[in-house]
Image (cartoon, helix red, strand yellow):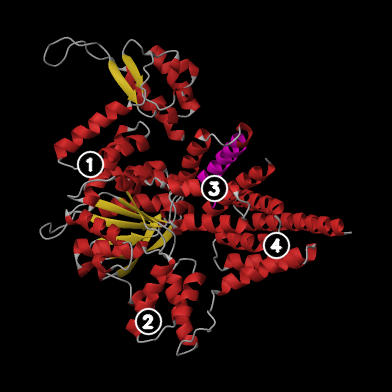
Amino acid sequence: MSLWVDKYRPTNLSKLDYHKTQAAYLKNLVQQGDFPHLLFYGPSGAGKKTRIMALLRELYGSGVERLRMEHMNFQTPSNKKIEIMTVSSNYHIEVNPSDAGIYDRIVIMDLIKGAAQTHQLDASGQRDFKVILLTEVDRLTKDAQHALRRTMEKYVQTCRLILCANSTSQVIPAIRSRCLGVRVPAPTHAEIIAVLQNVCKKEGVPLPDELADRIAVKCNRNLRRAILMCEACKVQQFPLTKEQEIAEPDWQVYLRDTASLVLQEQTPKKLLEVRTRLYELIVHGIPTDIIFKGLLKELIKNCDLQLKTAVIELAATHEHRLHRGSKVIFYLESFIAKFMALYLQFMEDTIGGMF
Amino acid sequence: MEKFIQVIRDKVKVFSQLTASAVRPDGRPCPPYKIVILDEADSMTHAAQAALRRTMEKESRSTRFCLICNYVSCIIDPLTSRCSKFRFKPLGEGMMHSRLELICREENVKCEQAALKCLVETSGGDLRRAITCLQSCARLKGSEGITEQDVFEVTGVIPNHWIVGLLKICQQSDFQKLEAYVEELMCEAYSASRVLEQLHEIVIKSTDLSDHHKSVICEKIALCSYRLQDGASEFLELLDLCSTIMKSNLKI
């Protein structure tokens, strides 16, 4: 049994649930049998990948859905071996080069060279180019992005790149200007509800309107999360009721608890306790910007405006430093410590003012 | 980066030491020197530029150098003083407009006048970018005409009402609203660096903000833009910027 998210993923450009005009344009684009390099960007769970796969299907037919996994090996100049997982069909190859960490440049160069130098054997009835799909381009190092730009120009004859990123701010302008940007906004509240109702109808599960509404609010306009939540609800309790509790991702709860710990008591002892929790979050692979965002949102809830701006500035500064440095825990902890000091001061001032 | 200096020392030096013939293969006369073209010379390191300086002087009998760069300030003084300079200004709007019109005519692309104007404005004097945008729009739309909206979508320009709305919300002191607004802006997948650019333009031209106020906002924009370049989180930076604007609004 597959998850609902995968089961009801539209595979055809004309069957997409929202952004229909965009889908029509994309169809236009591939109808001419050729397209420029593309850069899809949008928040997670907005349907970038769905659109890309539908586009490829439109281009190559159902052959793109026969996927196989492969491990590819690369060697760095310092003789270190890196292994990268790729997912490929006969027509395209999908890689997440940022898996290779700082060696992503080598992966990009070798991979594209390898894929682009082999021409399609039987050009009749097929396109004479391959598609390379790179995900999380915004996580690439600047070095790799520059390498990408060169290879993009060089092998435009034999391959097209489809890049997929969460935001374009981290993509260098040189790449942005070489690609046709396709913005995929997150689905609106109403669109999420419509999709949820649709999925549940196909599953034969009656979904109360109130529950759908609450899921749509909880999911932060992330459709994938919405469908997952909905399925989790069904597993928890069937048939679905309107007052039913919606299971949140546990890291979100954990993060919130951490924040409330900080608010409870501002002492070095608490800081130590918070540190273990932060470590826990980091080892579970929660991205640091999400940790910062989650903490910040909780922490500023009962501050006044003056303190709010100070704390936000603190968070922004520390988050930035984290990108320049290498050890994330330092910056997280320093942020918490600074916040504690500020908050304590603030509390003392307000209480002092009362007497 | 070490490569640059190596290239200058080995390749360029050896090449420029060779003399060229003053006659072409077909027997006609031609200038007796070779030309070395260094593209994007401003990305060369200073050390590499310094290495070039000697070669340039010594081999001037046999070789001429042609440097192409975006910023003349990135070329060290000794080099600029050895060259005669030609400045290329950004293309005028009228020039770009007529060029784009010509392309539309030749390629049979229907394009609204407003869209053309918008293309010229968003490209900031960069004709290549304008033409690529035009082509992308034409490809997306197929046989339909290109409207202003399409140009916005392809170039990633944020509709003005978003930016104006952001400023308006900063004027109220409702933090919750601000947070929700920034969140929504991020969900629409607009890039934060673009927001900063457009915000900057509006702030500079605005007549209701005082000079002091403008300077505070612009300084923060600069800081946020720098941090974004380093890969900082878009949400945090935007929120930081907006809360600063809000705070400075309250003070006045």
Nearer the observer: mark 4 or 3; the answer is: 3
Query: What residue span does the magenta drawing correspond to?
Result: B214-233
**Disc assigned to residue B168:** 3
Could you say where residue B44 lies in the image, as x and y percent from the top left? 44, 29
- Chain designation of label 4: A
Q: Which residue is mark 1?
A: B111
- For the residues beneath circles 2 and 4, the answer to whether they share a chain is yes
**Disc assigned to residue A200:** 2
Q: Secondary structure at mark 4?
A: helix
One can see residue A79 in this view = no
Nearer the observer: mark 3 or 1; the answer is: 3
Image check: A7 left or right of B246?
left
Name the residue rendered at 25%, 65% in the picture.
A13
- Relative to residue A181, is residue A64 depicted above or below? below
Q: Quadrant of the N terminus of chain A?
A: bottom left
- Relative to residue A71, is residue B209 depicted above or below? above
Say which of A172 and A66 sits in front: A172
- Relative to residue A228, is residue B210 depicted above or below? above
- Chain designation of label 2: A
Q: Which residue is mark 4?
A: A302
Residue B109 sits in quarter: top left
Name the residue rendered at 33%, 76% in the picture.
A8
Q: Amino acid at mark 3?
A: Lys
Q: How many marks?
A: 4
Q: Earlier in the sequence, mark 3 or mark 1?
A: 1
Say which of A157 and A49 sits in front: A49
